[in-house]
Amino acid sequence: MTVSGEFIAFLALALVAIIGGVLLLNLTKVVHMVVALVFTFLSIAGLYVLLSAEFLAVVQVLVYSGAISIIMLFGIMLTKHNDEDDESPSVGRWKRLFLLLGILAFGAVFYIGIYDLDFGTTPVALHENNAEQIGMELFSKYVIPFELMSVLLLVAFVGAIVLSRKDDDEKEAEKE
């Protein structure tokens, strides 16, 4: 078995994605969790590059690593939260044990699911007009879900503004 640079890049990016996900679950400060999530998003963008889906990699970096992470940070800043850890050490041990068992079970099920998987040998036009192919699929077959998601994001954004305004109005009422 020869080890190629692509294989080493895949292993490195997969390791960063897994470490980012595990850190996301184990860190206690919310801002640190967002940083771990950004590392996971960036490594997934690198995996898209390895799959010759450069357009998806750029969208992953712009939308998820950039916009979603900043929205999460604004949400953290606009809401009240308590960073104190109030669980006992024995609960923390059980939580880590169940987390480890869950990760191992997921890995075993994933391995069993893809061990003898056969995708067939139908030729696919890869590396050719990725953005055009995605655009044709998105705006022909999936235009309704695409528009529904834009409306849902708009409603969520307006809701966040309304919720932040209520807190400001309550604070002003308390001062008077």
Image (cartoon, rainbow, N blue to C red):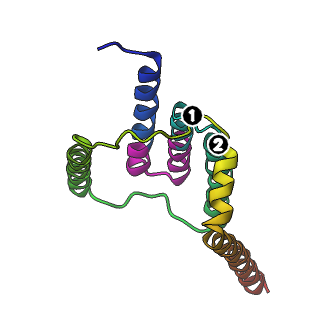
Pointer 1 local density, CA inside 10 Å: few below 14, some 14–19, many at least 20: some
Dots 1, 2 in contact, CB < 8 A: yes
Q: Dot 2 lies on which element?
A: helix
Mark 1 or 2 closer to N-term?
1
Q: Which residue occupies 25% across, 45% down?
A: 107
Residue toward you, 134 or 85 = 134
Q: Which residue occupies 41% across, 23% down?
A: 7
Q: Check disc 1 and give the amino acid type.
A: Ser
* Residue 169 found in image quarter: bottom right
Q: Which residue occupies 36% across, 61% down?
A: 86
Looking at the rendered image, the quarter that the N terminus falls into is top left
In this picture, residue 169 sits left or right of residue 61 = right
In this picture, residue 163 sits left or right of residue 110 = right
Count all numbered tags in the image, as a single digit. 2
Looking at the rendered image, the quarter that the C terminus falls into is bottom right
In this picture, residue 119 sits left or right of residue 162 = left
Q: Which residue is mark 1?
A: 52
Q: Range of the magenta residues?
A: 21-40
- Residue 9 coordinates in the image, percent (x, y): 47, 24
